[in-house]
Image (tube, grey):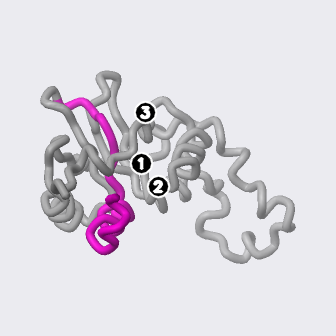
Amino acid sequence: MDSMKASDIAIAGATVGPSDTVGAALRVMAEHQLPGLIMVDAEDRPRRVIPGTQVLRMAIPDSLQDDTALVRAMDEHYADQFWIDEDDRPIIDCISKEKAKPGTVTRDATLLEVAVTMADLHSPLVAVVDAAGRHTGTVTLGNVLRYLTLPQAAD
């Protein structure tokens, strides 16, 4: 069996741009079952990793984020639909202004290189980039663990 490379286990197309909405970000995460998102610029270069918990927080109305008593008082219908009102806000308006460079690896990076990058950055995903630094895929912690611990998954 050939050794597994980052490009072999990367998910294609699972990114967002700064002008994408919170609703779009939630849908990308759900559709691809991602633990977070990679935000790319107009040239498809990774600019930051947004943890899934931060994306979820974007969807919660500001008035409810720190008021557990108010949250408990919401009816069930609203509790199931809370994020819809926040759906059309651009994610760039909702993220912290800290510049957090995302972890990147080349397409031919080994699983060990991917694992070390994730561990060093405490990130559940890394961007796979081509020679020009453009995003070609996303590797998730789940995929790394699956291929490291379940060799039959690679068949």
Question: Helix or strand or loop: what does disc 3 sit on?
Answer: loop
Q: Residue at x 59, y 37 (%)?
A: 89
Q: Name the amino acid type tagged 2.
A: Leu
N-terminal-most mark, 1 or 3: 3
User: Neighbour class for label 3 at 10 Å: few (<14), some, many (≥20)?
Assistant: some
Question: Helix or strand or loop: what does disc 2 sit on?
Answer: loop
Percent coordinates x, y for residue 133 in the rendering: 18, 32
Residues tagged 2 and 1 counted as in contact (Cβ below 8 A): yes
Q: Residue at x 28, y 39 (%)?
A: 47
Residue 37, label in figure: 1
Check the image and report above or below for 140 versus 135. Answer: below
User: Relative to residue 32, is residue 82 drawn left or right?
Assistant: right
Task: Give the residue at mark 3.
Answer: 18
Percent coordinates x, y for residue 23 in the rendering: 61, 42
Check the image and report above or below for 87 versus 64. Answer: above
Check the image and report above or below for 85 versus 61. Answer: above
Q: Residue at x 48, y 62 (%)?
A: 53
Q: Which residue is drawn at 22% across and 47% down?
A: 101
Q: Give the range drawn in magenta.
A: 133-155
User: Viewer-proximal residue, 30 or 22?
Assistant: 30
Residue 34, label in figure: 2
User: Viewer-proximal residue, 4 or 70?
Assistant: 4
Residues tagged 3 and 2 counted as in contact (Cβ below 8 A): no
Q: Quadrant of the N terminus?
A: bottom left
Percent coordinates x, y for residue 30 in the rendering: 57, 52
Q: In which quarter of the image is the C terminus?
A: bottom left
Q: Does the magenta stretch include residue 49?
A: no
